[in-house]
Amino acid sequence: MATAKRSSLRTAKADTSSRLEGSTARHRKAEPQMSTEPKPPFPKQKQSGTGLEAKLDPKPRYEASRYKPAGKLEGKCALVTGGDSGIGRAVAVLYAREGADVAISYLPDEQTDAEETLRAIEAEGRRCVLIPGDLSESKFCDELVEQTVNELGKLDILVSNAAHQNRKDGLDEVTDEELETTFQINIYAFFRLCRAALRHMKPGAAIIATSSETGFAGSKQLPDYSATKGAINAFTKTLAQNLIERGIRVNAVAPGPVWTPLNPADKPADKVADFGKDSDMGRPAQPEEISPAYVFLASPITASYINGVVLPVMGGPRG
């Protein structure tokens, strides 16, 4: 009898070990995400205005299906500018998955993209508020924050993500109007949104800006855009020092090339086809690869001692 029990136990252990080894083997065979995201060449394409994610081919990946939530933002309320598409949409969706209600701002022409973000957030079981408007207008920056608080009841996280960029061959192509637009949307709006948000934010709140690799190294075809990203980096560090005694953290994320609607709106069709080819990974990032950094910086669970940081998410040392 004892021999039979020992034999049965060995068999059970062997079966369990076999199943575990099989699971491990299958896991090892699966390619890592960094190897499976789309690579150039992409279809040649060109869009007008700021571009629409709905028209982009291939569609940017924002769902982050491998990302497992842990309640890092449970009960929080967030505002994400440029939340209709690209990095902003990916961030808004992950915030919802982690338990936050989210308001997003976008331009009126981007309504179709915004509604897709709305559906994605509601599918996570959270509330989404759509607020269209122009961030280059000081009044709208104030109204955006006030409407967010009125709709959601409070504001715990501000993500200043929306940006404007247009490539130029030389500085003489940067008109005063273009210079003003780029600064109004990229840095003035960040300043104004922070000023308005601080009327409502309490200890434990977080502010996150979207910077860029151009804020470190510049870009010869983006002189005005690069300047605003450098300003964002400096303002992030300054505000972090200013708000530390209030218990509010301020950080930024500096992505490298990312597959978003800005690309076909900003580049000739043939350049879009090769976008990201010269990066360290030989491809652009997908928005779902950038968004976890925003969760990390927003959550007091993961980043309570991180303040005044510009976090590079560039796919390598060169971006």
Image (cartoon, rainbow, N blue to C red):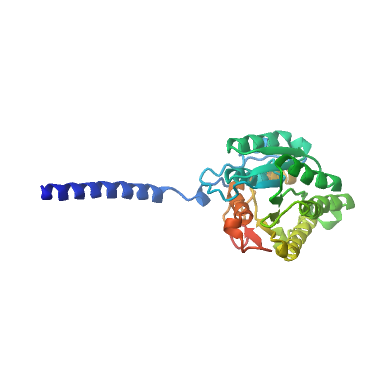
Q: How many marks?
A: 0
Q: Dividing the picture into quarters, in which one does residue 308 lie?
A: bottom right
Q: Is residue 5 visible?
A: yes
**Left or right: 166 with respect to 284?**
right
The residue located at (61%, 52%) in the rendering is 295
Given residues 315 and 115, the one toward you in this image is: 115
Name the spot of residue 37 as percent of width and height, x first.
Answer: 54, 46
**Left or right: 91 with respect to 186?**
left
Name the spot of residue 222 as percent of width and height, x first.
Answer: 76, 55
Given residues 319 and 18, the one toward you in this image is: 18
Given residues 142 and 93, the one toward you in this image is: 142
Name the spot of residue 153 as percent of width and height, x first.
Answer: 71, 43
Q: Is residue 269 visible?
A: no
The residue located at (82%, 54%) in the rendering is 188
**Would you place residue 187 above or below residue 152 in this image?**
below
**Would you place residue 110 above or below residue 170 in this image?**
above
**Left or right: 301 with respect to 137?**
left
Name the spot of residue 7 as percent of width and height, x first.
Answer: 15, 49
Identify the image quadrant of the C terminus.
bottom right
The residue located at (85%, 48%) in the rendering is 138
**Would you place residue 124 above or below residue 187 in this image?**
above
The residue located at (69%, 40%) in the rendering is 84
Q: Dividing the picture into quarters, in which one does residue 256 lie?
A: bottom right
